[in-house]
Image (cartoon, grey):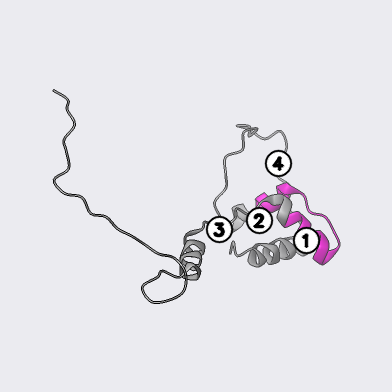
Amino acid sequence: MLFHKKPDSVINVKVEFGEGEGKVPLDNIAKRAEAYKPKERVTYKMIKKYIEAKYGFKVHTAYIAEVKRELGLPMYDAPNAVEELKEPRKHPMTEKVEAIKDALKHFEVI
């Protein structure tokens, strides 16, 4: 049998925001909310833009994925991933590997 139960007691709470005695400051709420905010996900596009701006050359997303794979970083499932590769993976030059690692450090991935 389903029924609604009436509460035994009720507690009324009145909170005032602002500055002064007995008031909750809004600045503290904003700071605590910022601490709980999840970090922005770093995309390959962001990494590519950073490398092009700092080093003056472009890197392919496959190179970024290869470096992340070598470092053991988490990889997201790609919707267009295939079971078997048609060609073996190409390894980036050391110059590009260092640039990609620098970008990953810049974005605090490593």
Q: Earlier in the sequence, mark 1 or mark 2?
A: 1
- The quarter in which the N terminus is drawn is top left
The secondary structure type at the circle numbered 2 is helix
Marking on residue 51? 1
Q: Residues within 10 Å of mark 3 (few under 14, many from 20)?
A: few
Nearest to the eye among marks 3 and 2: give it: 3
The residue stretch that appears in magenta? 47-67
Judge the density around disc 4: few (<14), some (14-19), many (≥20) Cα neighbours within 10 Å.
few
Toward the viewer: 45 or 97?
45
Q: Which residue is mark 4?
A: 88
Query: Percent from the top left, x then y, of residue 44?
Result: 69, 51
Whichever of callouts 2 and 4 sits on the residue coming sooner in the sequence is 2
The location of residue 98, given as percent across then percent down, is 72, 65
Q: CA distance from mark 1 to mark 2?
A: 14 Å
For residue 46, say whether it is visible: yes
Number of residues whose C-alpha sits closer than 10 Å to that of mark 2, classed few (under 14), some (14–19) or many (20 or more): many
Q: CA distance from mark 2 to mark 4?
A: 15 Å
> Can you say whether 84 is above or below 104 in the image?
above
